[in-house]
Image (cartoon, rainbow, N blue to C red):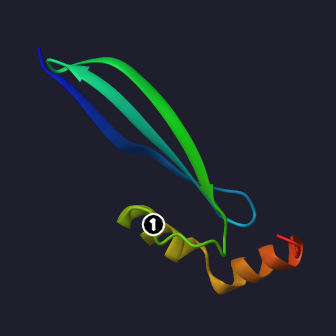
């Protein structure tokens, strides 16, 4: 019997006016090639937030959609955050 834990980012979405990036991470437990359990965790990255700890794929997406204009618009809409 062989157990393996596999963690993947299985969904990355861009939502809303300020291009919030939503990341869903799937954790699977696999036994002898068959998934026996899974769970999901989601987190978001707002325009202007530090995304340096994210995966290369998420960093690339943030760099494209979080333009200076989007960051400025979000900061104007939510000045206290």
Whether 27 is drawn above or below 48: the answer is above
Q: Quadrant of residue 70?
A: bottom right
Q: How many marks?
A: 1
Q: Quadrant of residue 69?
A: bottom right
Position of 49 with respect to 63 (left or right) is right
- Residue corresponding to mark 1: 53
Whether 80 is drawn above or below 36: the answer is below
Residue at 36% x, 66% y is 56
Residue at 71% x, 79% y is 71
Q: Quadrant of the N terminus?
A: top left
Residue at 24% x, 22% y is 30
Q: Nearer the viewer, residue 64 or 54?
A: 54
Q: Nearer the viewer, residue 2 or 43?
A: 2
Q: Secondary structure at mark 1?
A: loop
Q: Where's residue 5, x and y in %? A: 27, 32
Q: Quadrant of residue 4?
A: top left
Can you name the residue that lies furthest to the bottom here?
68
How packed is label 1: few (under 14 Cα within 10 Å), some, or many (20 or more)? few
Whether 26 is drawn above or below 77: the answer is above
Residue at 62% x, 81% y is 67
Q: Quadrant of the C terminus?
A: bottom right
Q: Where's residue 35, x and y in %? A: 28, 19
Whether 14 is drawn above or below 77: the answer is above
Position of 27 with respect to 71 (left or right) is left
Q: Nearer the viewer, residue 14 or 74?
A: 74
Q: Where's residue 36, x and y in %? A: 31, 15
Q: Where's residue 3, x and y in %? A: 19, 22
């Amino acid at each position: 019997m062989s157990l393996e834990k596999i963690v993947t980012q299985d969904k990355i979405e861009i939502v809303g006016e300020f291009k919030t990036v939503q990341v869903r991470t799937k954790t699977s437990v696999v036994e002898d090639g068959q998934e026996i359990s899974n769970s999901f965790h989601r987190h978001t990255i707002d325009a202007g937030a530090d995304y340096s700890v994210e995966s290369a794929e998420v960093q690339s997406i943030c760099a494209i959609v979080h333009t200076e204009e989007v960051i400025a618009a979000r900061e104007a809409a939510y000045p206290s955050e």
